[in-house]
Image (cartoon, rainbow, N blue to C red):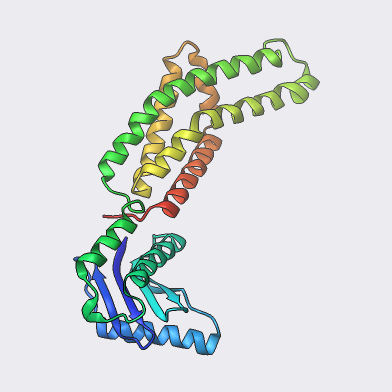
Amino acid sequence: MLKNLYILDESGILLYSKDFSREEHYDDNLLIGFFTSIANFSREALGTAVKYVNLGENNKLILVPNEDERVLGVAIVSTRDNDELVTKILKEILQEFIDSYSPDYDHEKILQEEMEKIIQDVLRTKTIHSPIFRNILSWLINVPLTILLVFLSINVTLFIYAAFNLTQYFNLNQLFSRFFPALILLSTVNIVILFLFPNLLFGFLSTNRNLSIAFSIIHLGATIALFFYSTEPAFAYIVLGFLPLTVIFALFFLSIGIRFSSKKFLKVK
């Protein structure tokens, strides 16, 4: 969540600021001195720019200097926000600011309305809005998708059974050389079919990590229930028999969706 935005010139003069948070308020004069000190120290003492500073209490600082124009963009965001995404947003806002007001950067000529429009245009495609709608959408997509995947899983299972002739009697050697490898393949294929795309979707669309985990668990229970009410209810025991592995895979796919979402969108309250 973007909390505060600042644009400064090389001498530390504040050119523009915007407070996105109604709960936390900062002393701009103290912060500007802090920003300038960090930028100057990192450039002169370290020979490189400090880009990220953890401020504690779920806040972090992201600095984006533009060396050509000698201006600095700074954002205070939540620690949960992706550094690369915030940096990209800052660069776009800073470039639009430079295009509009370079080379003078006269504070009196900087229009609040124009800056507001620039920021909104940049954030429009990079901020998650309507969390309730997104959560409902994830279920509207996943309910029919899960039914289809259960049907696909049953047919793939029957195919593997026939391909490996698993209905025949196995002696001890065949048990280890054919049955167990086929069973591992069968369980892995089923887990991927049933839980890859739904959990990626839950992770990508959900605006809350804990909520997406709850959705994933509900989806797992619903999938098992669908198997019990399908034409092949015995296949539900394949999922139950490998439940720990199923949960691990489901949470892994979920984490990929969450991570991809964090790189695409800022979270909002």
Name the side, left or right, on which 219 lies relative to 134: right
Q: Quadrant of the N terminus?
A: bottom left
Q: Nearer the viewer, residue 187 or 116?
A: 116
Q: Is residue 1 above or below residue 36?
A: above
Q: Residue at x 31, y 63 (%)?
A: 2
Whole-percent x, y for residue 136 in the image:
29, 35
Instruction: Locate residue 74: give its quadrant.
Output: bottom left
Whole-percent x, y for residue 49 in the image:
50, 79
Q: Residue at x 44, y 34 (%)?
A: 198
Q: Is residue 63 above or below residue 126?
A: below
Q: Quadrant of the C terminus?
A: bottom left
Whole-percent x, y for residue 72 in the image:
39, 77
Q: Nearer the viewer, residue 101 or 142?
A: 101
Q: Residue at x 35, y 44 (%)?
A: 206
Whole-percent x, y for residue 28 in the image:
25, 81
Q: Nearer the viewer, residue 105 or 140?
A: 105
- How many numbered callouts? 0
Q: Is residue 117 above or below residue 50?
A: above
